[in-house]
Amino acid sequence: MDTMVLVVAAIAVCVVIEMIGFRAYKRHKAKKESQFTKEHLAEVYDDLQAARAFCLAARRQYKELAAYARADHRMRDAAVLEAMEEGEKSHLAEIESFRERLHAESIDPAIMQVAGSSLDDALRSFAKKIDEWATETCSDFSARARLRGYGDIARMYKRMQEVESLYAGICLDIAEGVDDGLNDLSRCPTCGTIVTGRRPAFCTICTQPGFEFAAVPPSADEGDASGKQEDLSAKTVGCASASE
């Protein structure tokens, strides 16, 4: 009998402690949400605006580079660049999840001048800008958000930093004509990271399930272009034979 009383008392104490903890958590969450304003965020809010401006500019640049590659009949490269453009959309969506709560003002894309007389030169120039932003600016944004107590924003920047550094490396690989690592690609729909070969069970950056990754195949136009080239060659040979 005494044992049963002790068990019931212990359960009651656990329930009371859990209720007290839950109420304290709700108060903490409500207080933190009430402080999630432009005024309280201060520089962190400015960083969110700057990050959105950068991602808008990067997305536009990837789109232009992909069109350049397509015009140059580099369909595989165009498909990879378009995948990175989609990755920037993922970054923008994550940034927007914070900006919506702040009723942030609209922001124009950052000015991004990419120099180069050819696609490869433009890719090298762009890769340098992406890498500098990831390793310096984005790292500063993350540190500032963590210092101000906004761990969720800091973690977002950390993910962006890893993905943007990866994108810079891919741009350099395309520019240098490196084929290893640019085939059999797939992209995480949440953070935008791109992996080669077999998809992981979970994304190593955002833990998104691997089965949700989107394949990054060469453009369907590539097969059509090669087929048309073969037909053209065959016709040329046929015409030469007939003339003989």
Image: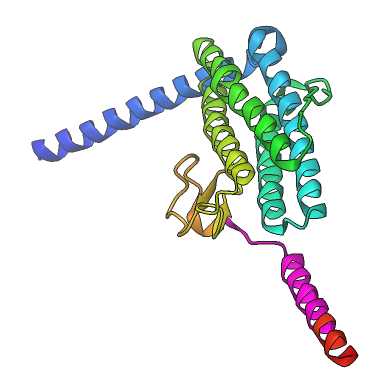
Identify which residue, 200 or 166, lies in the foreground: 166
Q: Compared to 189, does 99 lie above or below?
A: above
- Report the coloring of the rendering: rainbow
Q: Residue 35 falls in which quadrant of the image?
A: top right
Question: Does residue 62 show up magenta in the picture?
Answer: no
Instruction: Name the image quarter holding the C terminus.
Output: bottom right
Q: Residue 105 falls in which quadrant of the image?
A: top right
In the displayed image of the protein, which residue is found farthest to the left? 2
- In the rendering, at what x and y percent does residue 59 appear? 75, 37
Instruction: Name the image quarter holding the N terminus.
Output: top left
In the displayed image of the protein, which residue is found farthest to the front? 244
Q: Compared to 4, does 28 lie above or below?
A: above
Identify which residue, 15 or 169, lies in the foreground: 169
Say if residue 190 shows up in the picture: no
| 4 relative to 168 in the view: left or right | left
Question: Does residue 233 show up magenta in the picture?
Answer: yes
Q: Which residues are magenta?
A: 213-235
- In the rendering, at what x and y percent does residue 148 appear? 54, 10
Type of secondary structure dominating the magenta stretch: helix
- In the rendering, at what x and y percent does residue 63 appear? 78, 43
Q: Compared to 212, does 134 lie above or below?
A: above
At x 68% / y 52%, what residue is drawn? 77
At x 9% / y 36%, what residue is drawn? 2
Identify which residue, 79 or 100, lies in the foreground: 79
Say if residue 122 shows up in the picture: yes
At x 34% / y 27%, what residue is drawn? 16
Q: Compared to 173, does 96 lie above or below?
A: above
At x 67% / y 16%, what residue is drawn? 47
Report the label total.
0
| 102 relative to 150 in the view: left or right | right
| 163 relative to 76 in the view: left or right | left
